[in-house]
Structures are given as structure tokens and as C-alpha cells.
Amino acid sequence: MIRILAARELHSLFSLPSSWFMLGVLQFLLAWSYLARLDAWLQVQPQLALLANPPGVTAWVAAPMFDMVSLLLMVLIPLFTMRAFAEERRNQTLALLLSSPVSNTQLVLGKFCGLLAFLALIVCTSLLMVATLGVGTALDWGLLLANLLGLLLIVMSYAAFGIYVSALTSQPLVAAIGGLAGLLGLWMIDVTASDEHALWHILSPAFHFRKLNAGLLDSADLGFFLLFTATFLLLTIFRLQGNRQGGR
């Protein structure tokens, strides 16, 4: 059942013109960032050749680009998740879903997996774009895989948060604004916190992604992303349970 719901969600995302428009804008920005970083790397090659241990093309081009991808997805994911439950409630189809034999857990996981499959395509296209550098130079695949894992984890976290916000309202626009405001708030915590070990600082997904972006694989960061994702998925399930029992 989860697979069927995920396929339905994935099909609905690909059937929307707005999804294709946002994908087009995202790919344009990524291509621009990629070419700009590559051009900058080529221009500083004479200076880098004088260093004993110069940074490679992966650290110079790929890592900053993946960092930009994480910021762009932070803005775009609420636009993809806003329809998850808010539109179902607005179209009065949520009551039909809740009255069906599908459990709340299956419903939430189905929508989450479908959305995650859609977003994973964006992450993979970013990796393929960077992988073209391997045609002319050696790549640090360890750093690339760490960034790929970091992007997938942060996408999971942002998607779970966005789906939860969508379950709170019947207006997709309100869900998009609320999701974006929440994610921007978490990002601002990381940017403005002065103490590296402050509690609020550690609660930011961007803080944990920065370590993976630098190629540092820490079980604490992996645990944070999994716990963050599971928490908001559970909150969404509880929210739907309240709707099923007659709550608003």
C-alpha cells in the first residue's frame, strides 16, 4: 500500500507544470553555479600549482555547489510539500482517505516516499553534473559520497518537516509559507549562533550537513537527521489520528 501511495504522489508531482518550472529554475541555477566555480578553479590553477598540497577540484567546485544545492532545496521543498495534505483537506478528499482502510502510517509514509523519490532525482542530477569533472581530472569520491549522503539526509529532514506543516492547514500557500519560515528559522540558528556547541546551534540541520559537506562522517550527525525525520513524521501521523477521530 505504501508503494501504491508513493507512486500516486510521485505521479501527481510530475503532472504539475509548477513542478517542471521549479525543476527548470533549479537546474539553471545549479548549472550556473557549477560553471562559475569551474571557471574560478581554472583561473587559480597557476597559484594552486605552487602549493605543496593544493585543494582538488572536488573541494573547490563540488563541495560549494552541493552546499548551494542544500540552500536551494531548503527554499523549494516547502513548495513541493505544501500540497501533501493541505490540498487534500482543501479539496475535501482527506476525509475519504482517512475513512479508507489505509492506516495513518501508510498514508504518511506513502506521501513521504513519493516526495523523497522525486527529490532524490534532483540530488542525483547534481551528482551527475559534478561527475563530469572526472573526464579530465581525478575526483575525491569519498568527499562526493559524503555530500551525496548529506543531501539525501537533509532532504529527508526538510521533506518530513514540510509534510507536517502541510498537515496543519487546509491552504497550500499557508503550508508553503509556514514550512519555509520554519526551515529558514532553523538555518538562521546555525548562521547566527556564536557557540559551536550551543543547544540551538546543534538543532539546526544545516549545522550537521556542513560536516558532511566537508567530508566528515559522524554517527551523531546521521542520528540527528534520522531522529529529526522520524519526529516530524510521527507528529504528522498523530495529527492525522486527530483528524480521524473527528478533530479539525
Image (tube, grey):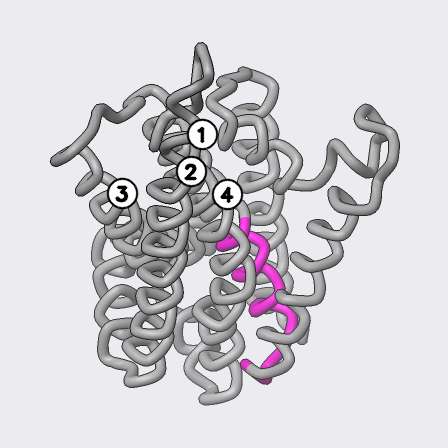
- Which amino acid does the dot numbered 1 rest on? Gln
Circle 1/circle 4 CB separation < 8 Å: no
Per the model, the C-alpha gap separating discs 2 and 4 is: 32 Å
Rounded to the nearest angstrom, the CA distance separating label 2 from label 1 is 5 Å
The tag earlier along the polypeptide, 3 or 1, is 1
Q: Is residue 31 placed above or below 174 in the rendered structure?
A: above
The structure residue drawn at horizontal position 31% and vertical position 65%, both measured from the top left corner, is 27
| Chain-order first, disc 3 or disc 2 | 2
Q: Counting residues from the N terminus, which is met first, the one under dot 3 or under dot 4?
A: 3
Res. 154 mark: 4
Name the residue nearer the viewer: 11 or 132: 132
Q: Is label 2 in contact with label 4 (beta carbons under 8 Å)? A: no
The residue that label 3 is drawn on is 130
Which one is closest to the eye, mark 3 or mark 1? 1
CA gap, disc 3 and disc 2: 19 Å
Mark 2 vs 1: CB contact within 8 A? yes
Query: In this picture, which residue range is highlighted in magenta?
Result: 158-172
Q: What residue type is disc 4 on? A: Ile
Q: Nearer the viewer, mark 3 or mark 2?
A: 2
Please tell me whether mark 1 sits on a helix, a strand or a loop. Answer: helix
Query: Which label belongs to residue 47?
Result: 1
